[in-house]
Amino acid sequence: MELKLGDLIITLPRVSKIQAVVNLTGGEMGIIVEKGPEGSDMPVYGVIINEQLYYLFEDEFEKLEEKC
């Protein structure tokens, strides 16, 4: 999946198991505002959800496809 700044995403149910994240569940929409360092096995993204910044791995959300 190719992700870039400004992409809309939706969280997957697995985010509710992240101990460091409070009150975040699957099915929440957000926008990518930051991308972690290049070359990582699994990049980390800064995602704004409900006016709060979360750092999520790319396997914890899906990109919302544009449908026309």
Image: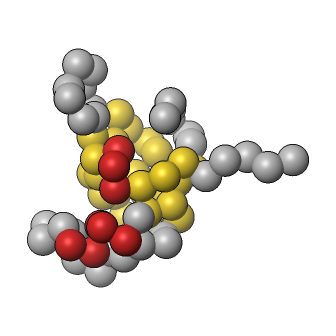
| Residue 6 percent location from the top left of the image | 56, 40
Is any part of residue 61 visible from this angle?
Answer: yes
Closer to the camera in the image, 36 or 62:
62
Position of 21 compared to 8: left or right?
Answer: left
Closer to the camera in the image, 13 or 55:
13
| Residue 31 percent location from the top left of the image | 51, 51
Position of 68 compared to 11: left or right?
Answer: right
| Residue 34 percent location from the top left of the image | 37, 38
Q: Residue at x 27, y 75 (%)?
A: 16
Q: Residue at x 49, y 72 (%)?
A: 27
* Colour theme: secondary structure
| Residue 14 percent location from the top left of the image | 30, 67
- Please say if 58 is above or below 38: below
Q: Residue at x 34, y 56 (%)?
A: 60
- Please say if 32 is above or below 37: below
Position of 57 compared to 7: left or right?
Answer: left
- Please say if 3 is above or below 32: above
Q: Residue at x 67, y 47 (%)?
A: 65
Closer to the camera in the image, 64 or 55:
64
Is any part of residue 51 visible from this angle?
Answer: no
Count of picture labels: 0
Judged from this view, the residue extending furthest toward the top is 39
Judged from this view, the residue extending furthest toward the left is 19
